[in-house]
Image: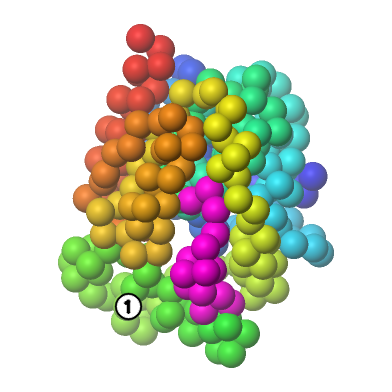
């Protein structure tokens, strides 16, 4: 297990918030106040934020092993998993590895498989990173990550100052490459998911260009899960934290009802 920076806050049923590919645990700041009544664990995965960035590829299985080790260290015998994008894939992998450890899954803006179209999108980020570093990777990625409504309402995000601020928060370029290559190693999880049997909610952004609805639908069908749309792009918890948190709370309360 890599050394991971984490934060635990709140009281109530235990919920783990799993970051997207390049995010820090602070990316959940808009959502955390809206999930009162739960004990929330959020952390920087290996290669993210202030966590360790060892050699090797950061595949979903490696991330899932880190998560299970962290839960063991904290003494958490069960929890809900709420994962965004790559965090959703990590949640799926962890649930397949240790299904009895988890009460249910909320999987947002994610996919259980890679097809040539999705692979090409993510590979473009890798090529941009190698050609022009983090700044070029951000210029290429952001129009895929955020929905049109959010970008039009926050034009400064795409300006030089906004890009520089995001660049300062990004993982090292070596870690970004390991994260991307690890993601691109995703195997098709759909056959294994059909027997998982955990309560699950699949969320997708109506404006998500990166992982549009067909990927969410395939995931929901594999899990036998409910599918729900959000009025966002790919970065749902940042674009509309209230709608995201409301969907999560509704699911969690339904499992406990």
Image coordinates for residue 92, horizontal then vertical, percent: 58, 39
Q: Front-most of 31 and 61? A: 61
Q: Residue 165, percent across and down? A: 43, 73
Identity of the residue drawn at 32% across and 78% down: 158
Place of residue 9 in the rendered image (x, y in percent of width and height, measured from the top left) = 50, 30
Residue occupying the far top of the picture: 257
User: Relative to 82, does residue 177 appear above or below in the rendering?
Assistant: below
Q: Nearer the viewer, residue 228 or 129?
A: 228
Asked whether residue 221 appears in the rendered view, the answer is yes
Q: Dividing the picture into quarters, in which one does residue 247 lie?
A: top left
Magenta stretch, main secondary structure, is: helix
In this view of the protein, which residue sits in the foreground, 45 or 85? Answer: 85
Which residue is depicted at the point 40% across and 58% down?
211
Residue 150, horizontal then vertical, whole percent = 23, 63
Image: 130 above or below 198: below
Q: Would you say 86 lies left or right of 205 here?
A: right
For residue 245, above or below residue 198: below
Q: Is residue 95 left or right of residue 221?
A: right
Tell me the residue that label 1 is attached to. Answer: 158
Secondary structure category for the residue under label 1:
helix
Residue range (magenta): 111-126
């Amino acid at each position: 297990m890599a050394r991971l920076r984490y934060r635990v806050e709140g009281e109530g049923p235990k919920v783990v918030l799993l970051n997207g590919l390049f995010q820090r645990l602070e990316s959940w700041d808009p959502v955390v106040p809206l999930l009162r009544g739960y004990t929330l664990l959020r952390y920087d995965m290996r290669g993210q934020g202030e966590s360790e960035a060892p050699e090797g590829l950061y595949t979903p299985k490696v991330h899932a092993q880190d998560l299970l080790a962290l839960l063991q260290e904290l003494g958490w015998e069960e929890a809900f998993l709420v994962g965004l994008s790559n965090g959703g894939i990590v949640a799926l992998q962890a649930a397949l590895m240790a299904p009895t450890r988890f009460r249910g899954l909320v999987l947002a803006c994610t996919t259980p498989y890679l097809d040539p179209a999705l692979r090409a999108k993510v590979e473009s980020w890798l090529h941009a990173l190698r050609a022009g570093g983090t700044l070029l990777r951000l210029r290429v990625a952001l129009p895929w990550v955020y929905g049109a409504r959010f970008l039009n309402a926050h034009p400064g995000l795409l300006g030089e100052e906004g890009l520089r601020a995001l660049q300062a928060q990004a993982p090292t370029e070596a870690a970004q490459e390991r994260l991307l290559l690890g993601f691109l190693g995703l195997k098709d999880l759909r056959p294994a998911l059909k027997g998982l049997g955990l309560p699950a909610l699949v969320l997708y952004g109506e404006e998500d260009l990166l992982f549009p609805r067909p990927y969410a639908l395939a995931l929901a069908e594999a899990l036998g899960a409910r599918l729900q749309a959000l009025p966002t792009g790919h970065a749902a918890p940042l674009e509309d934290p209230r709608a995201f948190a409301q969907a999560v709370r509704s699911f969690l309360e339904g499992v406990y009802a």
